[in-house]
Amino acid sequence: MAKGKKIKKDKRNHPNQVNLKIVTSQTCQVCKQQCSRGLAYLEKMSEPGTIGFGVPCILTNKTTAAK
């Protein structure tokens, strides 16, 4: 018996979910359109001894970047 083709499922949880890039504080610092999330992250990272993993950047989502 031959097996049928497997249908690939969409990896997104929701059809309107956007993919945002994780950016570091250096990227937020030189950004031309600084958002409130990025500014808060910059303030947090300015303290000595903090460790950061980046912040999702709303300006880099794929739907608005392509337009």
Image (cartoon, rainbow, N blue to C red):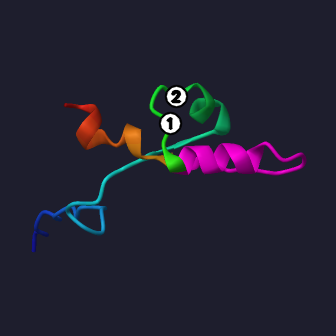
Q: Nearer the viewer, residue 47 or 53?
A: 47
Could you tell me which residue is drawn at 64 percent across and 49 percent down? Answer: 41
Q: Is residue 44 left or right of residue 41?
A: right
Q: Nearer the viewer, residue 25 or 9?
A: 25
- x, y percent for residue 16: 22, 60
Could you tell me which residue is drawn at 29 percent across and 33 percent down? Answer: 65
Residue 54 shows in this picture: no
Residue 50 shows in this picture: yes
Q: Is residue 49 left or right of residue 34?
A: right
Residue named by callout 1? 34
Q: CA distance from mark 1 to mark 2?
A: 6 Å
Decide whether residue 45 is among the magenta residues. Answer: yes
Graded by Cα atoms within 10 Å as few (under 14), some (14 to 19) or many (20 or more), the crowding at tag 2 reads few
Residue named by callout 2? 31
- Asked if labels 2 and 1 touch by Cβ distance under 8 angstroms, the answer is yes
- Tell me the magenta residue range: 37-55
Could you tell me which residue is drawn at 30 percent across and 40 percent down? Answer: 62
Name the kind of residue labelled 1 in the image: Gln
Name the kind of residue labelled 2 in the image: Cys
